[in-house]
Amino acid sequence: MAQTFTPIAPRPSPVKQTGFVAWARKNLFGSPSNTLTTLFLLGLAVYLIPGVAQWGLFNAVFAPDVAACQDARGSGACWGVVAEKYRLILWGRFPYEEHWRPILATLILVSGLVLSCIRFFWKPWLVLMWVGVLGAFFVLMGGGWFGLSPVRSDSWGGLPLTVMLATLSLFLAFPLSVLVALGRRSNLPVIRSICVTYIELIRGVPLISILFMASFMFPLFMPQGVTIDVLVRVVIGITLFAAAYMAEIVRGGLQAIPKGQLEAAATLGLSYWQTQRKIVLPQALAMTVPSMMNNFISVFKDTSLVTIVSLYELTGALGIALNSDAVWRPFKIEAYLFITVVYFAFCFSMSRYSLWVEKQLVKSKAR
């Protein structure tokens, strides 16, 4: 018998799984609640953005003209305060004619941080690179070498001081936090007690108290005639504070390692330090990347507290810039928005790098 050919009805094309439309369908309109939230936020943005754009762009004054800024008050922003005071805000009380030095020092330090985040540079010579980076930074900032005029550390300020305090404190705090976390889990009662006391004591007081004691109380315990630069004391205080919090983060990662892995390492004849270095710490630190990055970001922002000990980083330098010139003081909102953008740029970069590290760790586990 002859068979009749019956064509199959056309099927709908497959839904695209990549691109903005697919991402929006999954994240913004994936459920009724997500859809309502998205529509509400879109409506709020449509309501607010025109007014913000009118104030911040169309009616704003960008020239450092005080009279024009006064005329625009209430209807437009005065970005002229940034154009007039940005050098004092970014570079603090550093000698005006020598501003090329903090600019170059900051570029070198930030470049070192960027290169350290690239896998290609994760080599043993990275340590030597950082010796050169920090050496160049302090030579440029402090002077006294290669014909550079000396500049006291209490004249440093602005962005270079903020980046240096955060970078140096975190570099010193990280190995200390690992040792303290291991010490808190030690079977030796004396070591465990010392580590517990240190962690609980530091976490029990605010950073501002530690900075105050490091700056004003610590010199009282030094021998007569012996003084330590206030910058060094502040770095020590922030390092101890950050290490105490990071130690608890690392301890959480250590506790997540199954006990069977430790028993397997002992069976293989690995020593304590071999077990920690090859088995425990790589896994524990990988688990704590998000929490660790939160602590890094927190320390970066907490550097604004050093103003209490007369070190004027980014926020403190802004205070000097506004207080030293009363005519620009009414436009402090615009100035604070400026340093908010600077803080956000650094913190957002650290957050995105943390996500990249997490993705790399997921790939390594999938192999």
Image: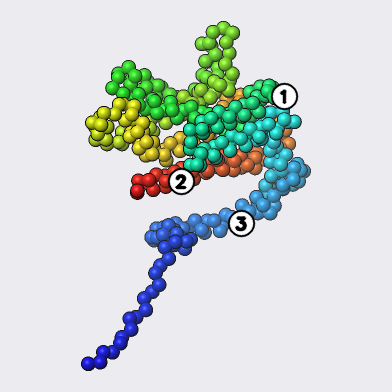
Seen at 42% across and 31% down, the residue is 246
Real-space Cα separation, disc 3 to disc 2, in angstroms: 35 Å
Kindly tell me whether residue 209 is visible in this rendering.
no
Residue 174 location, quadrant: top left
Q: Residue at x 33, y 84 (%)?
A: 7
Residue 201 as seen in the image, left or right of residue 5 = right
Residue type, mark 1 in image: Gly
Nearer-N-terminus badge (2/1): 1
The mark nearer the N terminus, 3 or 2, is 3
Residue, x 53% and y 24% (percent of image)?
235
- CA gap between label 2 and label 1 equals 43 Å
Q: Secondary structure at mark 3?
A: helix
Identify whether 80 is placed above or below 1.
above
Name the outermost residue toward the bottom. Answer: 1
Question: Label 2: few (<14), some or many (≥20) within 10 Å?
Answer: few
Between 182 and 364, the residue placed more toward the observer is 364
The residue positioned 72% from the left and 24% from the top of the image is: 147
Q: Nearer the viewer, residue 299 or 34?
A: 299
Q: Secondary structure at mark 1?
A: loop
Give amino acid for label 2.
Trp
Residue 65 point in image, percent of width and height: 76, 43
Residue on which disc 2 sits: 356
